[in-house]
Image (cartoon, rainbow, N blue to C red):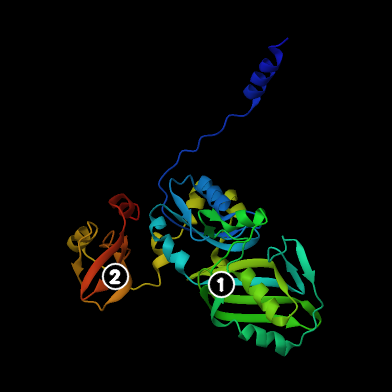
Amino acid sequence: MPNEPRIERRNEAAQRPARVKVTRRPVHGVLILDKPLGLSSNEALQKAKWLLRAEKAGHTGTLDPAATGLLPLCFGAATKFSQISLDADKVYEAQVRLGLTTDTGDAEGRVLLESPVRLEAAEVEAALERFRGDIDQVPPMHSALKREGRPLYEYARQGLTVDRPSRRVRIHELRGQWSAHEPERLALFVRCSKGTYIRTLAEDIGAVLGCGASLTALRRVGSGPLRVEHAISLQSLEALDEDDRVACLLPVDELLRDWPAVELESDEAARFITGMRRRVAQADCEAVRVYGPRVSQTTDRRPLLGSAHIRAGELIPDRLLSPPEIQAQS
């Protein structure tokens, strides 16, 4: 009798389906993902990585689980350039509830105060004007920003508030849609620098208007040159066969496409990828993408070798691809 529970547990374990081991492989490129609501950026990344059976992957900036939209994912060689997308300007569409403040600044928080909304269109526009250009923001407590090695949201969950220095961000463009027929609803279009917190922007606008505000929905629609119109959902990606999933990847140089290009022929390219500086007849430039010789005589396509900058006629390597990563583009 004493052994029966142990036998039962062994039988249960034997009935469980065996975990399928995924054989990873080198995959290179950029996937423009439309992240769904409720999924963290890392969860979305791991799902896409599993679907592609990729060895190496990373995302280019956290998108909150309560937000949807553009999440560029880098695979293989493209991970070397993920910082470019991290540093890029972002574009958001947001829905704001005027007259309602919460302890998190969004719809997931506890309601702190409800206020009547009695506004004129001119007041709303005047408030928006105050937030165009360079502004200072205090990061929200419910954020992944770290303090002494811990994300701020961990302190917030314990009911703690810690001092956060304000940060300078830039609002390049801020447009609002508001109507007296729906005075509690404010729709925002925001083009901003990296590190801008849209929920903080919504709260600060509400404070200026005197009625308070909280964020009810957020969608990222742009990051640098990338737009959500070209994104694919996880559901659509999963429905494809393996070859078609790989075909969804954009080239490794997608994140660098706004940079000037430098083309090197065989001898110069071979020296460049070893980290050697090369002489070029081009003006100084902070960032360029560098390509090697054509992959064949029948095409103009050249493999990306890496990124560099030009100073005093010298092409100085910054991030270099390895020979296998270069060969994978052929």
Secondary structure beneath label 1: strand
For residue 56, side relative to residue 280 (left or right): right
**In the rendering, which numbered label is found on residue 309?**
2
Which circle's residue, 1 or 2, is located before the other in the chain? 1
Secondary structure beneath label 2: strand
In the rendered image, residue 48, in percent from the top left (x then y), is placed at: 53, 50
Labels 1 & 2 near each other (Cβ < 8 A): no
Q: Quadrant of residue 299?
A: bottom left
Residue at horizontal 71%, vertical 90%? 122
In the rendered image, residue 126, in percent from the top left (x then y), is placed at: 66, 88
**In the rendering, which numbered label is found on residue 91?**
1
Q: Is 48 located above or below residue 255 in the figure?
A: above
In the rendered image, residue 309, in percent from the top left (x then y), is placed at: 29, 70
Residue at horizontal 53%, vertical 48%? 46
**Type of amino acid at the residue the image marks with label 1:** Val
- Label 1 – label 2 distance at C-alpha: 27 Å
Pick the quarter of the image with the C terminus: bottom left
Pick the quarter of the image with the N terminus: top right
Nearest the eye: 165 or 123: 165
In the rendered image, residue 156, in percent from the top left (x then y), is placed at: 64, 57
**Type of amino acid at the residue the image marks with label 2:** His
Disc 1: CA contacts within 10 A as few (<14), some (14-19) or many (>=20): many
